[in-house]
Image: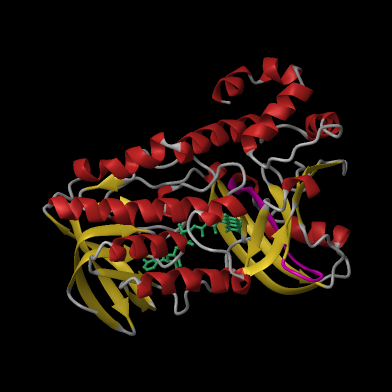
Amino acid sequence: MKEAYDVLVVGGGPGGALAAKAAAEQGLSVLLVEKRPAIGAPVRCAEGIGKEALAEFIEPDPKWIAADLDKAVLIGPDGTKFTIGDSHSGGKVGYVLDRKVFDRELVWQAAEAGAEIQVHARASAPIMIDGKVSGAVIHQHGKTYEVRAKVIIAADGVESKFAKWAGINTTVPLAELETCAQYIVNDIDIDERANLFYFSYTDAPWGYIWVFPKGHRCANVGIGIAGTKSGEGHRAKDYLDRFIAREFPNGKVTELIVGGVSVCKPLDCTVADNLIIVGDAARLSDPITGGGIYNAMYTGKLAGEVAAAALKKGDTSKKALMVYDNTWREGPLGHALARNYAVKESFIKMDDAKFNSIVHSMSDLSLDEITVKSLVIAIFKANPWLALELPRLLMTL
Ligand SMILES: Cc1cc2nc3c(=O)[nH]c(=O)nc-3n(C[C@H](O)[C@H](O)[C@H](O)COP(=O)(O)OP(=O)(O)OC[C@H]3O[C@@H](n4cnc5c(N)ncnc54)[C@H](O)[C@@H]3O)c2cc1C
């Protein structure tokens, strides 16, 4: 580890990896520090991603694809199913990844581009000079180092502290922090090409349950519920155990993970002098699904490119880095996050009776495109009463 770099990336998830790769490809000296001893492990993710989204960044490779999907099935509180995609979708729907392998591949690509990677290396504090972030204190193998950098990219995920230490308010309201639990369940009867989403206030208050196949008779089965709904006997794991006992009583559990997902609005501003915040650290996961792999990759790559352009001009002030914030916020990602936040706020508190009526109304519909927008438009068409109940949501579509 040197004492100074052009760019320091804190965090070796998809956001950090793409940021480091993009910056190194521009010829910058880049250090990526990851606090865990192994990139990609333990996995805290259901590992689902759309094929087209992923193709923006990387060629699909069977070594990190656990399942190739052709449909998603939404299941209402009374068990009524609505399927999106199927044979008409041309196999475009999505993948379930093997993130232990996938995350390592992304970091390896950053290293190949010239970035230096240090694992088991935790950033414990920013170095502040004249009120500006100018590096970080790094702990590794019992030693402490000071690393200076001209631009620091905070890619430290949902548990992000770096931006907060640098004076930015990153607090997620408890009601907008989904608490999640997930098992890998083996030896179960599943459709290996379908992601299942169960919506029911009783089973998963202000959240949902997912069953994402991971190959033959194996799936990620998980739940996210609002942080405010979690309590004694009502923890995410308790709800999940009840679901598993009902749906997969003979399943064999081989892994449990717990984690959090923010479903709030993005940070008000994702840059400061010498600092860019990406992915989950910037609260950019999707407010409906909690999905954030694509958003982290997109903003990570953008951050690396913006850092390089700013360094070429010799200006890494907040004003110069604002092009990063403006680009994602005013582009398709920012619009999708704003719309999906409005959709989440409108639907999340609906009771099971209303959810049932919506899912019943959709059973005759056929939808090949899996986008929130196409789904919500279909829901409004099939349920004209929603236009009166949620008039402001219509404006966002
Ligand atoms: C249960 C669950 C299920 C999910 N399912 C999906 C899904 O199916 N599809 C989807 O798209 N998204 C899903 N997500 C969200 C997805 O995992 C994240 O959005 C994505 O990983 C964000 O990438 P990131 O690079 O921003 O952060 P992360 O992947 O969280 O990476 C951040 C990295 O920073 C490291 N780090 C943190 N602090 C420091 C520090 N001080 N110093 C050094 N390193 C540090 C961490 O160890 C971590 O490796 C799920 C999340 C959970 C919890």
Among the 4 quarters of the image, the one containing residue 54 = bottom right
Judging depth in this view, the residue of 153 and 65 nearest the camera is 65
Residue 191, horizontal then vertical, whole percent:
83, 60
In the image, residue 83 lies in the stretch drawn in magenta: no
- Left or right of 229 in this view: 307: left
Does any portion of residue 34 appear in the rendered image? yes
Q: Quadrant of the N terminus?
A: bottom left
* Residues in magenta, as a range: 214-227
Residue under the point 34% across and 85% down: 141
Residue 273 appears left or right of 255:
left
221 in magenta = yes
Q: Position of residue 354 (x, y in %)?
A: 79, 29
The correct choice, above or below, for 96 with respect to 174 in the image is below
Q: Is residue 353 above or below residue 328?
A: above
**What colour scheme does the image use?**
secondary structure
Q: Which residue is found at the position 51% from the left and 53% from the top?
A: 294
Which quarter of the rendering shows the C terminus? top right
The residue drawn where x is 71% and y is 24% is 380
Q: In this view, does 65 lie to the left or right of 132?
A: right
